[in-house]
Image (cartoon, rainbow, N blue to C red):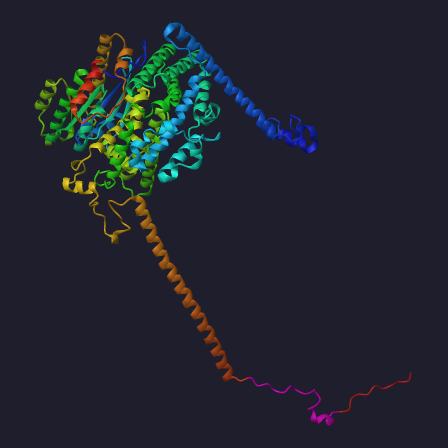
Amino acid sequence: MAAGGAAGGGSGRTYSFKVVLLGEGCVGKTSLVLRYCENKFNDKHITTLQASFLTKKLNIGGKRVNLAIWDTAGQERFHALGPIYYRDSNGAILVYDITDEDSFQKVKNWVKELRKMLGNEISLCIVGNKTDLEKERTVSVQEAEGYAESVGAKHYHTSAKLNKGIEELFLDLCKRMMETAQADERAKGNGASQSGASRRGVQIIDDEPQAATAAGGGCCSG
Amino acid sequence: MSQKFERRGIHVDQSELLCKKGCGYYGNTSWQGLCSKCWREEYQRARQKQIQEDWALAEKLQREEEAAYASSQGAQSQPQPSLAPFSKFEEKKTNEKTRKVTTVKKFFSPSSRTASKKAPSEKVEKVPGARERHGETLLRDLRGIFTPPWEMVSPTEENHEGKTPSPSVSRQSSTETDRVSRDFVEFLKNLQKPGREIHKQCRAFIESMANKKDLGADELSECVQDFYQNMSDRLLTHFKGSTDRVERVMDQVEKYIMTRLYKNVFCPETTDDEKKDLATQNRIRALHWVTIQMLCVPVDEEIPEVSDSVVKAITDIIEMDSKRVPRDKLACITRCSKHIFNAIRVTKNEPASADDFLPALIYIVLKANPPRLQSNIQYITRFCNPSRLMSGEDGYYFTNLCCAVAFIEKLDAQSLNLSPEDFERYMSGQMSPCRPEPEAWPSAGPGISPALREARRSLDLLASLEARQERVLEGARTLESDLIDWQESVEREVREILGRFPLEVRPPASAIDSDNVENDRLPPPLQPQVFAG
């Protein structure tokens, strides 16, 4: 769904995608995205003021893509705010730490929630970060990949420290979001009405997740 | 200019210096050769003409639109005098202002809450003077906050009660609206023909909205959003897909129509926005005891640059309420966020992640208690151009603000890592989080507001200054006594020496010859001898 695409007509069309980063506090979300957008890791010379909202312009197969990456607060006490963040997003990157079993359980919770709220419109990526600490691994590769497949998500292994697997992760995600946007367009006839249906901004949702589901569902279908 | 100066040195005709209007006063080149008085008149006339032209254009467009509407709608439409919507607008504007003041009053007098609900329609606020600007309105509102409710109703205000302001006077009061309209017309002039089309559309839309004021907030929002959608679709076709230019035009369109619609659609009567505002305000006030440590905010207010950023962030988030255009409100949130990022960056020496940012924003919102927070959030959600809100940077910060508000609303003991008992006690005001011992003043600590800490620091400084002054005075006193001692000792010494060597004055020596006893033994003095020659 979403703002995906829409902007631009004819050959020079531009896709705009919103991607949320979800995951527990210390799994390395920020490092991941800083590595991708600034190619820096734990660098004292990082010039950006913040690493919570970053953008990246890409060109994939002659199509321009504007990627907006939204970091989310990972602390447990902010978990309930998730729906406000991932509303209208085209993709979600769910990060866990391969040395931390708990963080993988958190990812499972997020997946359940996202699928319930946004259905299959959202492209999910499950990312096992910190592969440089392979020796301390506690989440098995088979388990993680098997789980990803079972929920229709793609699984990736990355290391922000060694800069491994990050480019592939984002490129792959962009391609999938483009496919979704194109399929969506074909289904709806034209791009304008599609973005019209999903254009309403952010709203504070009620504490009942059911209410939010209804709102989200209405937005997607209508 | 320089040429003129050179010539002046040689010869200047008196008539060249006089006002070109021939009023007899001297003119000035920077006023096109007129004297100050004539220039002012001339300038005013030109400006008035410009304004009138713009209004004439607007009214012409409006009439065209109405004619088209009437012909399309046939019998069911009611033709309106072209000026009616304007005066209607102005009336509503004044109502809005009155309501603003009464809202403030309401915060201070909970008992009158129900009664004041009717106030806006009964009482019309003092007609603002011709020179009144937006800033002054704001000032008055601010004054309202600091003035007890019983002083709020000034005699002048009551004198005007029930009087409807004449449209011409109140129009002058809406300087901002006029300025925005003028800017908009100026901007559209660059676009030429499509510009006129856009203007026509916007005017027609504003008129249509004036008739829809009874609709609920969601329907109003729907109307505005549809308008944005249609407009940007058409612009997209016109500019052949250049999204940048579409965005630029859409920003102006948003600014224009929202400045005009603001008073009707901000916190409308049909919603419970106002009630929510009050609830949030009270909630934040009840949470005054929440400290930076409970929220785990990575901000160290001991560092002057950090506390400076915190103050700026608070100012910006409060300023949001004074803006009319959704995009300007968003800009305030963005500025506030940037200051927070700066504070985090200085404290932690690394770029802020969302894990740091959200708690910091919550802290800022708690400290600032921004006026009409819910109304502003709802207003932005309903009427902001969606392209900004969906994926842009502004949208991200706005989302975080929504999160912060949601968090504050649902905040409980667990989210602050407190035991439920402590939380209850703090909330009921029976206890406040432990403060550091008074001995530890300079190092301060949790639970102490920066201002208080600053005051304490100043007190310490004053105390040390006092001690220093004491020391200086002491020194001065010893110096004084030293000087006296020294003087005495010198005197004593002199006396002593004088005693030891008394001054003996001998009689003066007599004439040279007086004691020359052997005088007669000397040969007689030579006598001059005379020679006859």
Quarter of the figure with residue B17? top right
Look at the image and give the residue range highlighted in magenta.
Answer: B503-522
* x then y, percent, for residue B135: 42, 32
Confirm whether the magenta stretch covers residue B519.
Answer: yes
Q: Residue at x 23, y 48 (%)?
A: B435
Name the one closer to the observer, B189 or B175: B175
Could you tell whether B342 is left or right of A128 in the image? right
Q: Is residue A49 visible?
A: no
Question: Where residue B285 appears, x then y in whole percent?
Answer: 26, 38
B119 or A210: nearer the viewer: B119
Q: Residue furthest right?
A: B533
**Residue B471 among magenta residues:** no
Residue shown at the point (26%, 48%) measured from the top left: B444
Work out which quarter of the rendered image holds the C terminus of chain B and state it: bottom right
Q: Residue at x 88, y 85 (%)?
A: B531
Which quadrant does the N terminus of chain B fall into?
top right
Decide if residue A4 is in sight here: yes
Magenta-drawn stretch, dominant element (helix, strand or loop):
loop
Quarter location, residue A148? top left
**Left or right: where does residue B103 sit relative to residue A204?**
right
